Image: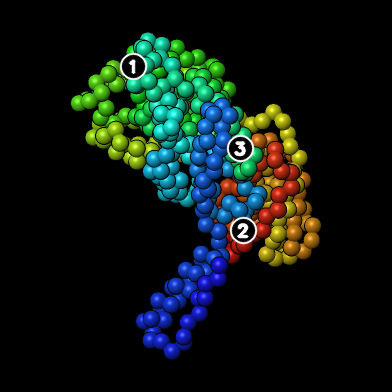
Amino acid sequence: MYINCTFNKKIEMGFKLKIIVIFLFCNTIFGQEIATIQKIKINSKILNQEREILIYTPQSYTENTLVFYDVIYVFDAQNREFFDFTHAAISFISNATKKYIVVGITSPYIENLDYARNNDMLPLPKHENQKEFYNGYNGNADNFLNYIKNEVMPFVNSNFRTRPYNLAIGHSLSASFILYSMFKEPNLFNDYFAISPNLAYDKESLATMFLDFNSQNINNQTFLYLSNANEGENYWKEWLTARNKVYSFLEKTKDLDQINVVIKKFPNETHWSTFAPSFIAGFSEYFKYLENKKIKYSDETYEITLLVKVLNKDDEVFVTGNQKALGDWNPNSIKMNYKSEFEREINLKVKTPLELKFTRGSWETEGLVKNINDYVNLYINPIKQHKFEFEILEWADQME
């Protein structure tokens, strides 16, 4: 599509100012790719149903083909509010330093099958009659979990530039489901955000699973966020008892090993209104957690080549990053080799996960890379790709 952003010169000064603003706005829109949302149909053999998923890719995803992203899976995305709030709020909470691929997992009501979201979220009851338990809308949680593991995730990882790091977000029964997934498939997700989960169903079955869970089944350090609103006070009284059992267990237990637990309470919020403030509080804590998290690197080493296009033929370029092969964030430790007047190159042996930046020898001379917003870390995946080319748009000390 072409939009003509030129205008008649014979206009008054006030209007000229408006035209300049519009012209700059047009340049911004067409000069940089915007974030996108795709709706994708999956014919699930596991569920024997057609399901729709939503996939958000951040700004410059298509342009910047070298960057790979962690993935957030948002459940109950048939309510678009959950999905849209997630991909919109992340930037504000992280001060525009974090970008994710966000996948919305929908659980719509399918009229001809008389199938509802509760079928997805609830396993077969152990203590109640299945036909009476949630009016019979239950029992398919294990198949739904297999659908996520064996159909949705492989599709996302095959068709999008993902890193092997997944987060799960759920509200109400979908929060219960992601906790259930942690017990059944403890390494499917890396981190969990369970907002107002129902821990009381089927005579507190999920609460009991919490108390019996062996955290040693989790291979990697995990962030677990639990929150509640005013459930259990004037309604759903049984929620309070089950929740208190789990909270007390988590607060007293010292041998959770890999699990970093954060609990937040929002007694002035309702079951529905709590999602936004709880999400913001949870991710605020999560980003603090990431800053202090000890990185567990892969056992395998990968050979990569980095090529950087520079602004000036006499630029000396250093690469630095989150591991010894990259100087452990020392900005003048690893100098790149001269390849041509405007190109620098280096071969390295690295581990995953991998983060890096470019400088001219100090943090004051950090480089701004094309198609990357601001001076943020570059996340690349050496498992899927071995040669990476970057272009420096400006150096921090030479900004005009």
Q: Residue 210, percent across and down?
A: 42, 17
On the image, which quarter does residue 170 sit in?
A: top left
The kind of residue on which mark 1 rests is: Glu
Residue 155: image tag: 3
Q: Residue 191, percent across and down?
A: 49, 31
Look at the picture and state if 103 lies above or below 23: above
Q: Is residue 329 visible?
A: no
Q: Would you name the residue on which mark 1 appears?
A: 132
Q: Residue 383, percent across and down?
A: 70, 38
The answer to the question of whether label 1 and label 2 lie on touching residues, with beta carbons closer than 8 A, is no
The kind of residue on which mark 3 rests is: Phe
Residue at x 43%, y 89% (from the top left corner): 10
The colouring scheme, among rainbow, by chain, secondary structure or one colour, is rainbow
Disc 1 to disc 2, C-alpha distance: 58 Å
Camera-side residue of 278 and 82? 82
**Camera-nearest label, 1 or 2:** 1
Q: Residue 33, percent across and down?
A: 55, 59
Residue at x 61%, y 58% (from the top left corner): 370
Residue 96: image tag: none
Residue at x 51%, y 40% (from the top left corner): 53
* 3 or 2: tag closer to the N-terminus: 3
Element class at badge 2: loop
* 3 or 1: tag closer to the N-terminus: 1
